[in-house]
Image (cartoon, rainbow, N blue to C red):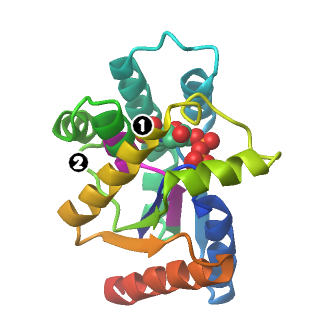
Amino acid sequence: MFVTIEGPEGSGKSSVTKEVVKLLEQDGEIVVLTREPGGTPIAEEIRNVILDKKNTAMDSMTEALLYAASRRQHLVEKVWPLSKEGKIVISDRFLDSSLAYQGGARGLGIDKILALNQYATDGFYPDLTLLFDLDPRIGLARIAANNNREVNRLDLEKIEFHDSVRKTFLELAKRFNDRYVVLDASKPFGEVVQDAYKAIKDRLAKCK
Ligand code: TYD
């Protein structure tokens, strides 16, 4: 099973997911947690280029192509082989981040970015996508308060950009409602962990 974790900056998705992985492992599941952009050495090198704060001249389509390139490498080297071995692969961000950030917020168009990604991924989709929905004002305030979280090039975008990311994610949740589960990430941490865990268990029960 391939699960993707999506949401705006500071939605707590990465910390929650780490806790959910522990719960799944306690149930005897073999889980691999990975992330995008990155997840393999080549894809991490592409990540450094994309997120580098000094790359202010990067064209939006170049950005979209780099995310798609890093995604392809991540799938080939990691996600596909591990899924074939029957492991649960959970990726912190995947395709839908490109649709929301590059397609929606950057204004390149969801369908154009979907087509680009279908080419890059051979039309591969996650079995389940958890959307950690949150007002970006809350998320960005959390990041500002957390000294351990490095600020990247996309965090520095204006609030309208982040509002557009959220809006696009919610549109995607409607469009792909067969694989999406929307979680309220403004709830207390422990409750969001339970909601995310339950969503994955429900989907596992359907897959088995
Ligand atoms: P990261 O530090 O991993 O942020 P987060 O903790 O919020 O996941 O940085 C990833 C950034 O890249 C984040 O701002 C979202 C953005 N992104 C895209 O714009 N398109 C994509 O396809 C992906 C995977 C990420």
What amino acid is labelled 2 in the image? Answer: Gly
Identify the residue under disc 1. 161
- Image coordinates of residue 34 in percent, x first then y, are 59, 54
Q: Nearer the viewer, residue 114 or 140?
A: 140
Could you say whether the residue bearing mark 1 is in a helix, strand or loop? helix
Task: Assign a secondary structure to mark 2.
Answer: loop
Q: Nearer the viewer, mark 1 or mark 2?
A: 1
Q: Which residue is mark 2?
A: 123
Number of residues whose C-alpha sits closer than 10 Å to that of mark 1, classed few (under 14), some (14–19) or many (20 or more)? some
Q: Residue at x 46, y 79 (%)?
A: 200
Q: Position of residue 198 (x, y in %)?
A: 49, 87
Residue 55 on image: x %, y %: 57, 14
Q: Is residue 107 above or below residue 175?
A: above
Provide the residue span drawn in magenta: 89-99
Marks 1,2: beta carbons within 8 A? no
- Residue 26 figure quarter: bottom right
In this orientation, which residue lies closer to the viewer: 111 or 205?
Answer: 111
